[in-house]
Image: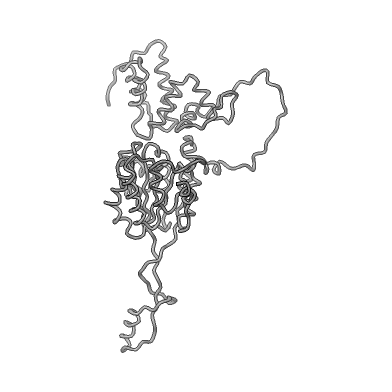
Amino acid sequence: MPEYAPIEIPEHPRLAQNIIHFARALRRAGLPVGPGRVVDAIRAVEAAGFTERMDFYWTLHACFVNRPEHRRVFAQVFRLYWRDPRYLEHMMSFMLPAIRGVQEERSAQAAEKRAAQALLGDEMPEMPEQENEEEGTQIEIDASMTMSSEEKLRSLDFEQMSTEEIAQAKRMIARLTLPVKPIASRRRQASVHGARMDARRTIRSALRHGGEIHTIARAKQRERWPNLVVLCDISGSMSQYSRMVLHFLHAVANEKGAGWAKVHAFTFGTRLTNITRHLATRDVDAALKSAGAEAQDWEGGTRIGSCLHDFNRDWSRRVMGQGAVVLLITDGLDRDDVGALEKEMERLHLSSRRLIWLNPLLRWEGFAPKATGIRAMLPHVHSFRAGHSIQSLEDLAEAISRPDDLGEKARLMALL
């Protein structure tokens, strides 16, 4: 164990105390912050100084953040705790439905609600009552018939969930299934009530009886289960959505008797990574941890066309030779060559039995296919659906076996 020299603590060590409270807020927000990191942070600030706030930010960032998905949470907690002088009012505006003069007419940004809940803790501060407020009639509302917490959570955007809501959503996702109907195979199997005659079995039976045909063997068409191939975008704009979708895929891959022959999962950002073997781990946290360690481009850039080219070249014939159903989870925001992206999407479309695109941007009512990447990809998918909430994943389970399901594709194709 390393031995530290004693720290010279001033008479009123307010900065060290604030760093300790800041570390507690990060821990409540989901970051693995222990006492050792707090000591390292205090020593690092002592060594780096407290002159430039950007130096202070990156000093604490180096001590408390060791995973890409924690960067955004750290940034929001840091902004609310250290930078914003009205951080308490901002947090209360996120946590309460309406506060006098504080509620802002906007939705919380990514990780802001988690940061607010982490800084407020479990106890909500009481707002002082105005003395000149006129007394009015109190109305009691019976909320016994309103939606339950799970029903509200089903339609809540993954990006706007707090830490507690994310944990509850993961438990709900673990119970979801993705059933699929079997598909007819070209092979046949023996059946007494088969619709066609099995000539080979009939002749073999006749040879055992001197060439006389006593019975006619029958056969029916064999059924088999398709493969599920998932291509999940893990770029910066998709990090929270892809993390929840991977929880869903882990539940599907480990659900026995769900119907899929095998579930193949790939992540892509700036490069393609096969994480199929990691999803076979029964513990979801261990599975996603090992998958995240192998995929080094979490919360990075996006090169959809290049990654689809790698998949079509290296993996398409291996995993899609049995009429696989493909789930493509991405927002479609790509800056690569549009012509190459369209070519790779067309090849993926022709190789798959069904190609379903889940896009979290479809949650907006005014969504239109204006981005060049979306315009290039949309004509080559069988179905285009939203993928931003638990409800959207439940709708996917109902629509994946319907060959006539187009989702929002027809409406958006009319806008092209």
Give 347 or 230, whichever is nearer the viewer: 347
Quarter of the rendering occupied by the N terminus? top left
Residue 351 in picture, x, y percent from top left = 34, 56
Residue lying furthest right: 137
Give 347 or 274, whichever is nearer the viewer: 347
How are the colours assigned in the image? Answer: one colour
Left or right, 46 with respect to 405, comes to: left
Residue 204 in picture, x, y percent from top left = 31, 82
Left or right, 385 with respect to 142, comes to: left
Name which quarter of the figure residue 203 lies in.
Answer: bottom left
Residue 316 in picture, x, y percent from top left = 30, 54
Residue appearing at x 27%, y 51% in the figure: 313
Residue 207 in picture, x, y percent from top left = 30, 85
Residue appearing at x 30%, y 44% in the figure: 306
Residue appearing at x 40%, y 53% in the figure: 355
- Number of marks: 0
Give 167 or 1, whichever is nearer the viewer: 167
Residue lying furthest top: 11
